[in-house]
Amino acid sequence: MEEKEISQAVVSRLPRYFRYLGELRDQGVERISSQELSRLMKVTASQIRQDFNNFGGFGQQGYGYNVEFLYQEIARILGLNDTHHFIIIGAGNLGRALGGYLNFEKRGFLFKGIFDQNPDLVGTRVRGIPVMPMERMESFIRENEIDIAVLTIPKAGAVAVAERLVKNGIKAIWNFAHVDLNLPANIQVENVHLSDSLMKLSYNINRNKEEKDC
Amino acid sequence: MEEKEISQAVVSRLPRYFRYLGELRDQGVERISSQELSRLMKVTASQIRQDFNNFGGFGQQGYGYNVEFLYQEIARILGLNDTHHFIIIGAGNLGRALGGYLNFEKRGFLFKGIFDQNPDLVGTRVRGIPVMPMERMESFIRENEIDIAVLTIPKAGAVAVAERLVKNGIKAIWNFAHVDLNLPANIQVENVHLSDSLMKLSYNINRNKEEKDC
DNA sequence: TAGATTGTTAATCGATTAACAATC
DNA sequence: TAGATTGTTAATCGATTAACAATC
């Protein structure tokens, strides 16, 4: 539907707009100008207007933006009105934590199954759902119309599992494994590399220390 | 020490270089050219050379880069030779998962303590370390030279806790709470907003679907 | 020395910011 | 209508890529 290609820089900012607009709405705020939002979010008003205009004119000259309307529009753009079924591959600490996270459900992401190759974990429950063995994965995806897989296994097995997922019709992978997945372009991959994030933090701690030395 | 200001775009790429160089080293590769690394990592050779040159000349004309040397240099730049002591605030699923993650230790990040306000969780153990009550946090930070705090609590309490952390000398916050922390510039904050990441994935699934409709 | 490949400058590209005409 | 604020074009800034001289 949307005409022009939207840059990922813009896409990355949408969830943050969504969060602020949700909070404003909950506070009963009905309208907001790009300038007010700018002060609140610490980004330029210009960027806010540019970003929203990528998706059409949501505001009104002389008035600003209707908070509720803009909130709903961003939800729609992000696809939060659709329902997604996800499974988790890897029932270690992180997999179990993500399975237990209730907030995803509010946004239309439904936790449907969890798998692990460790027989000791198979049968244990995560939010009432029993961990299944890896052999069950393929048929489960097809039977339950799973479109998202969350990968929380060690990097050694991740590439092979990702390929199995893709073969069985998964559309997107939320990848917590510390490895790059090279998959067909129509498969969406979103990486969360926690140790990379921690290293960035480490770099910035150091940089700050050195600045003070000068 | 370093002269020019390095952009965060460059810093974000360092952990990925570090990962690839570590793998090459483990495979016994001794030297690599920017062109070979470019093919491997799917970034331009030009960018690789520019990135490394921000920190000084690590290569040699006609030869390329020594893998082991470059690996060690990036470790040093990222501050991975230093030891950091971290605590986790919030002993829910995610906090416990991060506390149990052993790989952080290999990079010099040592898990020293975990706190929660829920009396039912206090005293339960995460990797052998008992969860402490929130009242104990301030003194613990000072007594154990803690420099990093991992924030895995609901957003409602996060801002107040962050301020307490800063008051007691924390240098950096790894923030998993779904809220923006506005802290003094000398405090480093690295945000991991999991639901934002999931929304991005959702957007990209949708976009892909629409492209096919055209 | 000749070949290879870096370090670095210059060119290009894309994203952000500024400015202002359109319009509610 | 006058004031406010968007939508959008133009200017700027920064990041990426290309090119090539330096040099191992």
Image (tube, coloured by chain):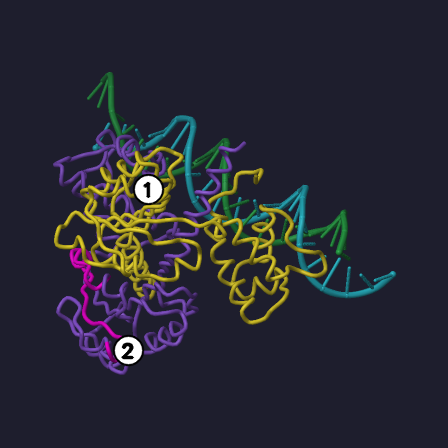
Chain colours: A yellow, B purple, C green, D cyan
Q: Write down the region rendered in magenta.
A: B98-120
**A104 or B59, which lies in front?**
A104
Residue B204: horizontal and vertical position, in percent? 44, 43
Residue A6: horizontal and vertical position, in percent? 52, 42
Pinpoint the chain carrying mark 1. Answer: A
Looking at the rendered structure, the kind of residue marked 1 is: Glu
Q: In the image, which is nearer the foreground, mark 2 or mark 1?
A: 1
Decide whether residue B112 is among the magenta residues. yes
Question: Could you tell me which quadrant the C terminus of chain A lies in?
Answer: bottom left
Q: Which secondary structure, mark 1? A: helix
Looking at the rendered structure, the kind of residue marked 2 is: Asn
Q: Is residue D13 above or below residue A19?
A: above
**B18 or A16, which lies in front?**
A16
- Residue tagged 2: B118
On residue A143, the disc is: 1
Decide whether residue B115 is among the magenta residues. yes
- Number of numbered discs visible in the structure rendering: 2
